[in-house]
Image: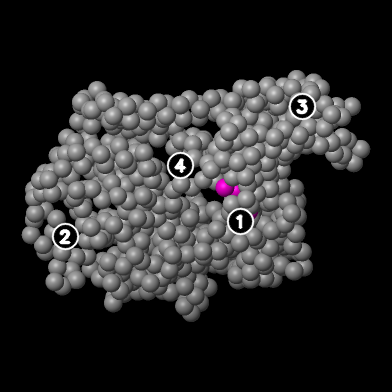
Amino acid sequence: MERDSYLTMPNRRRTSQSARILLVDDREEERKLLSDLLRLHGYRLHIAIDGYDAVEKARYILPDLILMDIYMPGCDGIAACRQIKADPRTANIPVIFLTAAALPEERVTGLSEGAVDYITKPYHFEEVKLRITIHLARNGDEGRATPAPAAFGDHPVDSVEHRVFRAAQRLLLEDLAKTPELSTLARAVGTNTHNLNEAFRKFTGVTALRYLRETRMKEACCLLRNTNLDVQSVAIDLGYVSPANFSTAFRERFGMSPREFRDLPPDEVRSHDGCSGSNLECGSGNRTVCETMGFAGSHADIAEQPDDAEACDADHDAQLDAVFASSPDGLVAFDAGLCVKYASPAYLQMTGQKNAEIIGLGKRDLFTSLSAICVPTQSSGGVTEMWQALMDDATGQHHLRIELAGKVRRVLELTLRLTSAAAISQILYVRDVTYEAEMNKMKSDFVSHAAHELRAPMASVFGFSELLITREFDSETRKDLLQTIHAQSAGLIEIINELLDLARIESRRGNNFPVEALALDSIVDDVLKNMRIDQERWPVVVDLPADLKSVMADAPKLRQALTNVLGNAVKYSPDAGAITIRANSCTDSARGFVSITVSDQGIGMSSEQTARVCERFYRADGSGKIPGTGLGMSIAKEIIELLGGKIEITSALGKGTAVTLVLPASE
């Protein structure tokens, strides 16, 4: 069979006994719930665990229908759908999204990217079966044959690069007025910025945002020549922040203003793919035309009163210097040759660069000096790719965030803006967004993780309880289902309780807990009595010196922190083993502290896992076999720090973990 023969394969209507369904979900419990149901009705099931896996398996399996979760790590459902629809081999496979709570805008996004339907969680099994039946029948009537798209040169149309390019190209061309962040565009098609730009270079010869900029210019030529829209309307339609910025970008590209282009005689204009465009390339020796545009000035009295003009310019420059010097945000001005003409004090303070070192540098050279003081980025393309994107789009809509290297974390947001002034062509606007970046990341991570962790047990409880209501099972199966429901309900209650604990702790930030001098032996005894640890499997050894000082703490909160730490020692020692609780007095300068160390002989952690163990929702166990929410250590850390102490963790894989709570000692 030839490589592309699948494009002309005859239509095959499948019954439920032969239909192939690709189920895509990162949660094992939810995959099990749906797969059991679908296999029960005779469907042939294939499983993918994330968006990347789904794209590859869709190409090789060619399923009759795809059921795909939206929220997955790495490559989410929307990005995977874009790639599936960009590949001619899989473009006609119906995709049904699975989601816990789809907002109207989210549904519109999914449907516009090629999905045929949504199924909300928790599942109603009759609805799931009916929707699958409808879309299988629909797809059978319409057939699976798809004409091959036009190839780009000699590149294979079914390559990963081509799918990424086609999906991103579609997003860009849908709305030329919108300039996406390069990283956002890359995430939207399931890749990174480096691979995205490489795909665009392979098929167009330029980066993604340079492609967008050139496409905008091409569309601008078309609108100027073939419509009566004024320059302001054209600028707005193409996403420029102002007519002046549009005119400057147009002049930089073609050597003349939009109005002058519109007035060109027909013999000086040639066609670009059906639209009229300029035959004048950027910087292409069109000096006589440029000289007639009045770059020397547009007011008649400038030539007549040069002294007054110079005095006016000097006064204007002084005013600008005063404004720039007082601005808390950094500013770098580039002259007509794209060399640094001015750098504000705020910019120099933010970056630590010297004025004498950067004045006169070209724009690319300034980037080189900036990249040298940045930490490596997470994208494989590094800062170079992101900076190139910024350079390719100077409409003021593209923002680049970089993190400077140093002991204190600093995140800067860079925006490049065109100007209509002759002396200053572009301005680099730099803003310190360190606090904003930290807060946004914390909020988005928290909401995302909380929703993800709550969704799984809710879906399982609903699904398995519906199975019990609608079907008859033998006593052993029924007991197994009830135990699953009970376990998932307990997990759900644990998550909700710990979220409430976090909320209560957060609400007290800025207010001290009611601390008092507490004897550690009584606190430890209370915790051990309440936890009822199996002493045969996990014998607990308590070693508290008789002369140990009391600690200054809030009793309920200290019990909670110690309970969380001990709970982890038990859970992460699945093969049992002794647990030791030791306490010691220590000093930090003139201040006294008491340290409480809980040591286990469990599975331990790597250095990377140890560094992240106090992050909210982070779990060192990647198998999912050890129960937990990933909030316990985060809560313990919050409590100890609010009590004026700190938490220290040492661990080694296969050898166990030691967690030390350090608290102020009583006087």
For marks 1 and 2, the one nearer the N-term is: 2
Mark 2 or 4: in front is: 4
For marks 3 and 4, the one nearer the N-term is: 3
Q: How far apart are the alpha carbons under marks 3 and 2?
A: 73 Å
For marks 1 and 3, the one nearer the N-term is: 1
Q: Position of residue 446 (x, y in %)?
A: 53, 37
Q: Quadrant of residue 387?
A: bottom right
Mark 1 or 3: in front is: 3
| Mark 1 Cα-neighbour bin, 10 Å: few <14, some 14–19, many ≥20 | many
Question: Which residue in the structure is indicated by mark 4?
Answer: 625
Question: Which residue in the structure is indicated by mark 3?
Answer: 520
The answer to whether marks 3 and 4 mark residues whose Cβ atoms lie closer than 8 Å is no
Check disc 2 and give the amino acid type: Thr
Q: Quadrant of the C terminus?
A: top right
Mark 3 or 2: in front is: 3
Check disc 1 and give the amino acid type: Ile
Mark 4 or 1: in front is: 4
Q: How far apart are the alpha carbons under marks 1 and 3?
A: 46 Å
Q: How far apart are the alpha carbons under marks 3 and 4?
A: 33 Å
Q: Which residues are magenta?
A: 603-608
Question: Which residue in the structure is indicated by mark 2?
Answer: 146
Q: How far apart are the alpha carbons under marks 2 and 4?
A: 44 Å
Residue occupying image coordinates x 25% and y 61%: 60
Q: Position of residue 365 (x, y in %)?
A: 64, 71
Residue occupying image coordinates x 42% and y 58%: 191
Q: Secondary structure at mark 1?
A: strand
Q: Secondary structure at mark 2?
A: loop
